[in-house]
Image (spheres, rainbow, N blue to C red):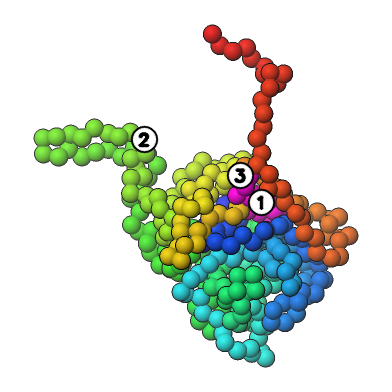
């Protein structure tokens, strides 16, 4: 399960951030894919037009779960259990893709959300097992570009089409339409103190700031994470700089981040947040924050040099060592207060 959101700061910078929550350690790395590179997908080859970076692994071929390309298009795949419907057979009139190859196809081919809205009509997602997890992954996708336009692709029928996402948030099942309707339950919540009514001859005392959010769900279900993320995105103070925006996104995702053991399925498998990623769509940068060292941002920039000189994929092996900054007397600047 996962939580994702898009964000626009006060300087017009656009971002996509997500948690990757799963019960299998993907040993995720940051991977760069070059322009004009032939990808051997599970259901056929395709050649990239644009270079991109994202969370990926070189398995039988290059597989990505999210990323950003040189055009400023970003996409993230999230689990969509009991709702994703794929086609059983190939179609000669369509581009056949395995669901787990769709992220790489979008990043390698698409220039904007508007571009994908047209071209996705020619795509068909076919039921295909992802070897790493040994199952057909039920997926839906959040897509955004450097104009800030955000859409969702939910494969629930034969023809693929993009859905507008007015809140720029996506979690898991149920579908986006249900999640948006469910927000009406929380439409009276606010970030300010809520005055209390008098009951008969008794005036309850206020609990102070935060009472406006009483009723905001705090559990790890998809529905609750969706509502909580929308609330925090709406009310958090809007930052200006890229650094401050990533910092805010870290705090928002804290509300959906799952520690190991806090969410256990009936089969005993524990889902936890393996990584959190932050994509800057205007500057084409990709950053990861791993479970093992939260707060440590490991980033790759999609530079002109990388795009023009690198002709084969690159995997960046990430540090998983927890970071502790030891403060010693020589860095102290103020005497201790008496």
Mark closer to the observer (2, 3) = 3
Q: Say which element carries label 2.
A: loop
Relative to 32, 132 lies left or right: left
Q: Is residue 119 magenta?
A: no
Which residue is more in the foreground, 130 or 34?
A: 130
Which residue is more in the foreground, 284 or 251?
A: 251
Mark closest to the chain's N terminus, 2 or 3: 2
Mark closer to the observer (1, 3) = 3
Which residue is identified by label 2?
Answer: 209
Mark closer to the observer (1, 2) = 1
Which residue is identified by label 1?
Answer: 288
Q: Say which element carries label 1.
A: strand
Residue drawn at (74%, 66%) of the image: 58
Q: CA distance from mark 1 to mark 2?
A: 34 Å
Relative to 202, 110 lies left or right: right
Q: Is residue 269 above or below residue 286?
A: below
Which residue lies most toward the front here? 268
Q: Is residue 8 above or below residue 63?
A: above
């Amino acid at each position: 399960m996962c939580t994702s959101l898009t964000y626009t700061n006060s300087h017009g910078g656009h971002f996509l951030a997500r948690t990757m929550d799963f019960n299998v350690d993907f040993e995720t790395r940051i991977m760069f894919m070059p322009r004009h590179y032939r990808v051997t997908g599970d259901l056929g080859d395709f050649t990239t037009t644009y270079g991109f970076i994202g969370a990926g692994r070189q398995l039988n071929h290059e597989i990505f779960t999210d990323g950003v390309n040189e055009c400023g298009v970003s996409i993230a795949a999230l689990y969509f259990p009991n709702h994703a419907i794929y086609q059983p057979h190939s179609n000669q009139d369509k581009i056949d893709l395995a669901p787990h190859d769709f992220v790489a196809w979008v990043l390698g081919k698409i220039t904007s959300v508007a571009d994908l809205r047209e071209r996705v009509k020619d795509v068909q997602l076919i039921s295909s097992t992802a070897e790493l997890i040994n199952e057909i992954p039920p997926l839906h996708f959040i897509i955004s570009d450097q104009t800030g336009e955000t859409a969702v692709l939910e494969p629930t029928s034969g023809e693929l089409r993009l859905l507008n996402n007015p809140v720029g948030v996506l979690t898991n099942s149920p579908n986006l339409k249900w999640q948006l309707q469910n927000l009406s339950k929380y439409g009276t919540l606010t970030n300010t103190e809520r005055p209390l009514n008098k009951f008969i001859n008794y005036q309850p005392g206020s609990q102070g700031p935060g009472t406006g959010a009483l009723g905001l769900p705090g559990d790890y279900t998809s529905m609750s994470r969706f509502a909580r993320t929308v609330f925090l995105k709406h009310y958090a103070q809007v930052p200006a700089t890229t650094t401050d925006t990533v910092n805010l996104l870290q705090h928002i995702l804290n509300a959906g981040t799952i520690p190991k053991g806090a969410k256990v399925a009936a089969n005993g498998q524990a889902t936890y947040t393996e990584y959190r990623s932050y994509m800057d769509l205007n500057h084409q940068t990709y950053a990861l924050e791993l479970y093992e060292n939260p707060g440590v941002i490991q980033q790759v920039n999609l530079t002109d040099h990388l795009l023009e000189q690198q002709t084969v994929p690159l995997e960046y092996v990430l540090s998983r060592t927890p970071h502790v900054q030891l403060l010693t007397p020589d860095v102290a600047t103020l005497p201790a207060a008496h």
